Amino acid sequence: MSGMAALDVRGLVKAFGGVKAIDNVTFTVPDGSLTAVIGPNGAGKTTVFNLVTNLFRADSGEITFYGESILGLLPERIASLGLIRTFQTARVFPGMTVLENALAGAHLKVRSGMARQMLWLGSARREERTLRAEAEALLDLVRLSGLRDAAGTDLPMGGQKLLEVVRALMARPRLLLLDEPAAGLNDKETEDLAELLSAIRGAGITVIVVEHNMSLVMSISDQIVVMDAGKVAACGTPAEIQKDPRVIAAYVGQGTVTL
Amino acid sequence: MNQAIQTVIAGLLQGSVFAIVALGFSLVYRVTGVINLAQGAFCVLGALTMYTFQVVYGVPLPLALVAAVIATSVVGLVLGAGAFVPALTRLSNSSVLMLTTGLLTFIEGGILVYWGSQPYQLPPFSGFRPVEILGIRVPTQGFWVLGAVALIIVALWYLLVRTTVGMALRACAENRLAAQLMGIDVRRMTLLSFALAALIGAVGGIVVAPVTSLQFDSGHFFTNFGFIAVAVGGIGSFIGSVAGGFVIGIAQQLAAGYISSLFANALALGLLLATLIWRPNGLFTSGPARRQDVRDEQRVYRAIVRLHGAGGASFAIALLAFALALPWFLPPGGLLSSLVITGILYIAVLGLDVLMGHAGQVSLGQAGFMAIGGYTASILATRHGLPPIVGIGAGIVVSLLAALVLSLVTMRLRGHYLALATLAFGLLVDSLSVGMMDVTGGPSGLTGIPSLSIAGYTFATPLSMYYLVLAIIVVLLLALTGAMNSGFGRALKAIRTDQTAAAALGINVPRYKLIAASIAAVLASLSGSLYAFYFHFLSPEMVSTRLSFEMIAMLVVGGEGTLIGALFGVALLTLLPTIFQPLKEYLVMAEGAILVASFLWLPEGIFGTAAIWFGRLMRRFNGKPVPVAKAERSS
């Protein structure tokens, strides 16, 4: 975990009306690490994701991705740099099959343009076959390959969340933001997810995950960022976090901790 | 000075009608969030029913008026209960918008069947003699029209603000679900607003019928200008609707009086486009515009239709063999010619399928690009003696430029606003092709257009055109199938349903929308030129907004998002009237009915439904269980 930080967030502020949803948030995600963001509901975890991917515009602060400022870039531009996210409620594309949904994730990797695809050129068809094989392998990993031709939205909630992770992986991200990937998953699916996450780490992809499932968080993460009321309440290794009294207070929900 | 005042008064009269139609739009929009394009047809229906009661049966005026209004409201109730209300719960807002174009066509078709195509005019309520005020002659009917507007506004205000029903109606507008949870019967309230809008339309039509003549398709006129008024004034605002109506009416009369009537329509449409682009919420309202992408929040996920691999290939080969052999088995007569027309129109509908069926961008102006292509190609070929193929190329270039400009100005618009902007574009092209007499030949059209010839060979016979069009279609289908089954098609389909998620995957949404719009424009333009070269004639009527609506019907009936599906829709709506000549009278009505019915009961279209059945049959035949996602996951 040496070298340049994958993501560096400094002094991030975002207010909705008079409410400061994000108040001076600062944290660093080292390259190749798995960082978990935890905190009670409404702490601002998803809002941080939305600011990083510029779904909402930050009021002030600095966001750098491998040394490059991405503040204010268009969402598709941020994605093209290798920063890919999933959503809190799965946003599987309706009207597309499971396989097509997974393939849609590979959008940035498709080299052959519309003209080549229209001409059915060999290069375009080979590329399509390669992507298909890749998608099927990933779907296999989360036990969805048998359902490749079903409508993506026909999957149960857990399956849709896994499919969304697969779709994000198809983009070969450098940094993957997962928003509550275990929400709505049953125990078996959560195991599949844990397996998938360690495979992702094995592939050298940096991950930030917002998650409520504490046993999952404690077992997989290198670093934990605890948020409360729009601020970073604590940041450290799982062992450090487990011992931090302020974290326990915040997470159990005994009022707001003043820092 | 006197003339100016006369013109303003005429504008006020004209504007009151637009205002009444706009009020109907606003009422339905406030309760349902949908623009009901059928609104204008209720005006005509009301007025013609009145004509029958008063002039044909000699019923006294007040009685005839009440009876006509009631009859129109009943029609509104029936159509509302049978089509509009069920559609609201089943379809996305933009699909409902297109469904209402079907209702408009249906009512106009019904009027055509009962009253025929001749114009009608009612006698004025209080005699023909105009009153003179300060030396200015004002027709007495004008007071009736203005009075009706005032009465409708007051009645609407009282209903919505002072009664419990009105409160319930407003609650539905604010939040349907919450209203439902509070015990309000949302379906009944929706139906009530729809019927009430029909009633308002009928009153408007009746009071104006003595000053303008009406015929079966005047509903289009009322709908178009009513919606321009409501969009300029602010959709959903009653005061805005009325103000918008008067502004459009007066502006139009002034422009017509002092410049030309061509300029009048173009001015109104220009005003509309400008409003949609800079102040989508209208000139007379404040606050943020409602700007959801209507296809984003598709309420019903349609079944997925895919014919892959061997199945798709063998189907395509069988279809091609059938198409190649077809001319040799046809009885002599006009059928081959109808097939050529089917093929030419299919090229344009194919473009619409890329834009609407795949990328989910509603376009009510596809025929506008046909007009641009057709006119450019035929003017170059007739007046400047250029080879047709050069004309086709030039038409495509001009259409691409038009598509580029339209896309840039509508880039920020979504859903309804996008649909309305494309409609405005189509209407603008309509009014230009009618009005620019010197260039387009005006309403009577361009004649003497040569046959298409390529490299010395002239496609003069229907048979040669048939094979040429077939070849073009095969090439287009191959290219589009390749693109739609690859990354390009997936990007379009992703945009169709969720632009945020698409952008998060790096899909450049504006760029893909622009490409889809360009493909649609190019294909429409090609189709329009082929149309002109085949008929040796081109008139504004052949490529008007009515055709845009028709092409939507063809696409939906055939099956959206399947490329080949549209062919069946085009064939059905083009060949049926040729095969059953006596049915011609019912054609317009049937077109409307087919569009409405397929939106409601056959959302995957003819081809989609057949493909789904076939898929099920094959799976049963192969002995494999139908994969049901839920069953397998929970095991």
Image (spheres, grey):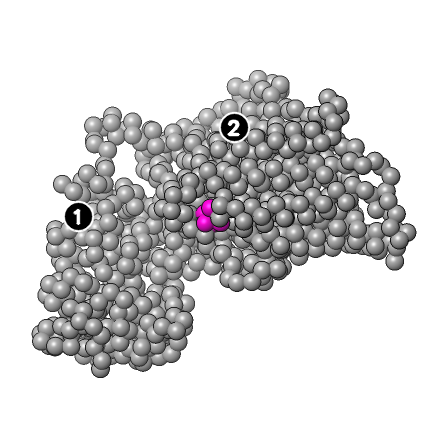
Apparent side of residue B464 relative to residue A76 in the rendered image (left or right):
right
SS type, badge 1: loop
* Magenta run includes residue B416: no
Is B39 left or right of B61, judged from the image as shown?
Answer: left
The circle drawn on residue B323 is none
Position of the N terminus of chain B, as image quadrant, is bottom right
Q: Nearer the viewer, residue B337 or B503?
A: B503
The residue positioned 21% from the left and 69% from the top of the image is A39
**Chain hosting mark 2:** B
Can residue B171 be found in the magenta stretch? yes
The x and y percentages for residue B210 are 77, 36
Three-letter amino acid code of the residue under disc 2: Leu
**Residue at x 32%, y 74% (from the top left corner):** A22
Q: Chain of mark 1?
A: A
User: Most prominent secondary structure in the magenta stretch?
Assistant: helix
Toward the viewer: B458 or B589?
Answer: B589
Image: magenta residue range: B168-173
Image quadrant holding the C terminus of chain B, namely top left
- Residue A28 image offset from top left, x and y in percent: 24, 77
Residue A116 seen anywhere in this rendered image of the structure? no
Total number of numbered labels?
2
Per the image, the residue denoted by label 2 is B572
Residue type at mark 1? Arg
Looking at the image, residue B29 sits to the left or right of residue B302; the answer is: right
Camera-nearest residue between B502 and B618: B502
Q: Which residue is mark 1?
A: A143
